[in-house]
């Protein structure tokens, strides 16, 4: 087998792994965002649903924070800093929502922006695979 063919196969496998990770991230963000959107604290049991969705969202953003602060993270520093800021904002705003001083709307919008970015990333990876 020629070296160029081996390199192409290795690159293709790497792209598949990244696509799979991106698909998983997209699925998790979509599920949590859907739960945040559906939670209605004005109905019986609604506040409990909201609190659970906020907790799951906070866990997700805490994981992102840890990933962004890991020394092996290869994302550009500007992007990492932006995600760190969003993780901290999410933590603070979630507390305000739980205290009844805010709504989860901005958290939902942040997550929707991440979802849109993940979809674009996935589309780009699939386009590269097809080429």
Image (tube, helix red, strand yellow):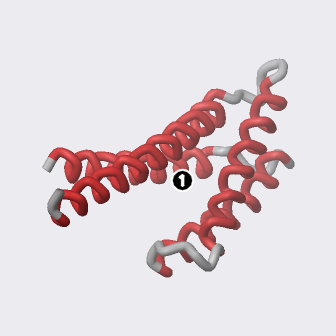
Marks counted in the figure total 1
Residue drawn at the location 26% of the way across and 46% of the way down:
126
- Answer with the quarter of the image where residue 61 lies: bottom right
Residue 41 spot, x, y in % from top left: 77, 30
The answer to whether 2 appears left or right of 68 in the picture is: left
Q: Residue furthest top?
A: 44
Q: Position of residue 70 (x, y in %)?
A: 64, 74
Between 4 and 24, the residue placed more toward the observer is 4
Lateral position of residue 49 relative to residue 14, left or right: right
Identify the residue at image location x=45%, y=48%.
22
> In the image shown, does 15 or 95 lie closer to the viewer?
15
Q: Helix or strand or loop: what does disc 1 sit on?
A: helix
* Residue at mark 1: 110
Quadrant (top left, top right, bottom left, bottom right) of the N terminus: bottom left
**Residue at 86%, 48% in the rendered image:** 99
Q: Is residue 62 toward the left or the right of residue 85 in the image?
A: right
Q: In this view, does 4 lie to the left or right of 81?
A: left
Instruction: Name the spot of residue 108 as percent of width and height, x first.
Output: 57, 45
Q: Callout 1: few (<14), some (14-19), or many (20+) C-alpha neighbours within 10 Å?
A: some
4 or 64: nearer the viewer: 4
Residue drawn at x 48%, y 46% as measured from the top left:
112
């Amino acid at each position: 087998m020629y070296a160029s063919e081996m390199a192409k196969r290795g690159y293709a496998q790497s792209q598949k792994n990244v696509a799979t990770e991106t698909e998983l991230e997209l699925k998790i963000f979509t599920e949590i965002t859907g739960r945040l959107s559906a939670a209605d604290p004005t109905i019986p049991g609604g506040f409990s649903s909201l609190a659970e969705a906020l907790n799951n969202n906070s866990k997700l953003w805490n994981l992102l924070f840890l990933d962004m602060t890991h020394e092996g993270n290869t994302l550009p520093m500007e992007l990492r800093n932006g995600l760190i800021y969003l993780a901290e904002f999410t933590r603070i705003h979630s507390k305000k929502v739980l205290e009844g001083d805010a709504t989860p709307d901005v958290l939902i919008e942040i997550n929707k922006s991440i979802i849109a970015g993940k979809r674009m990333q996935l589309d780009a990876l699939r386009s590269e695979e097809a080429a």
